[in-house]
Amino acid sequence: MSAVARRYAKALFHLAREANQLEQVADELDQLVTLVTSPELAPVWNNPLLNAQERREIVAVLQRQLGFSDLLGRFLSYLADHKRLRELPAIRQVYQQLLDEAAGRTRARIVSALPLSPEQVERLVQFLERRTGKKVLAETVTDPSLLGGFLVEAEGKVYDASVTNQLALLAARLGAGTSH
């Protein structure tokens, strides 16, 4: 993540906390980033040839149509004036990390070869909550290339219990001449 995005996200987080709008701003950022990264709007949003007034007009139109808060509107106008609108997806990501940290939660990505049952996901979430000491919000993804098993990405760590990884470990042991 860029230092610029981190600095802006921290500033927005501070302002939203003072205004008691942390979750509202997070929701608005999610909605806005989804829109401005769409194939229809991304070329306009990221156009470096727009002047400050044109960028502010785009922000004003989006604010009217989406009805997001004045706080976010002022923040976006500031980004527009400083040619930083392109940083919005990264700002949103850092903002979400700050919000999760403040709320004592973390996010995890569970990748499995086949869809997991709700009970399996819950057991993995409970394991992660014990390991991290935080509430875990899990996203599940299927990836048939794992052959079987699963891997979990959380807090910069990877727990790899996939068949693909087990085969790679076995091959490495056999290649090194050791057996267990």
Image: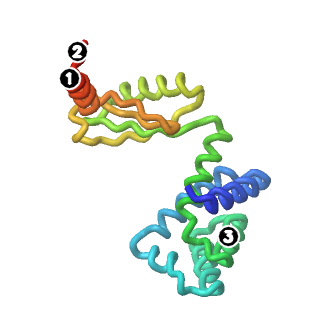
- Local crowd size for mark 2, using a 10 Å CA cut-off: few (<14), some (14–19), many (≥20): few
Q: Earlier in the sequence, mark 3 or mark 1?
A: 3
Q: Amino acid at mark 1?
A: Leu
Residue behind mark 1 = 174
Residue occupying the point 69% across, 55% down: 10
Q: Amino acid at mark 2?
A: Ser
Task: Reply above or below: 44 against 127.
Answer: below
- Local crowd size for mark 3, using a 10 Å CA cut-off: few (<14), some (14–19), many (≥20): some
Q: Earlier in the sequence, mark 2 or mark 1?
A: 1
Q: Earlier in the sequence, mark 3 or mark 2?
A: 3
**x%, y% of residue 12?**
70, 59
Q: Which mark is residue 73?
A: 3
Nearer to the camera, 30 or 178: 178
Nearer to the camera, 41 or 43: 43
Look at the image and tell me in which quarter the N terminus lies. bottom right
Residue occupying the point 71% across, 70% down: 74
The Cα–Cα distance between marks 3 and 1, rounded to whole angstroms, is: 60 Å
**x%, y% of residue 66?**
57, 69
Task: Reply above or below: 167 against 109.
Answer: above
Residue behind mark 2 = 179
Residue occupying the point 59% across, 52% down: 94
Determine whether, in the image, residue 75 is placed left or right of residue 144: right
Q: Residue furthest top?
A: 180
Q: Are marks 2 and 1 in contact (CB under 8 Å)?
A: yes
For the question of whether residue 137 can be seen, the reply is no
Q: Secondary structure at mark 1?
A: helix
**x%, y% of residue 106?**
55, 37
Q: Secondary structure at mark 3?
A: helix
Look at the image and tell me in which quarter the C terminus lies. top left
Q: Residue furthest front?
A: 177
For the question of whether residue 1 can be seen, the reply is yes
The Cα–Cα distance between marks 2 and 1, rounded to whole angstroms, is: 7 Å
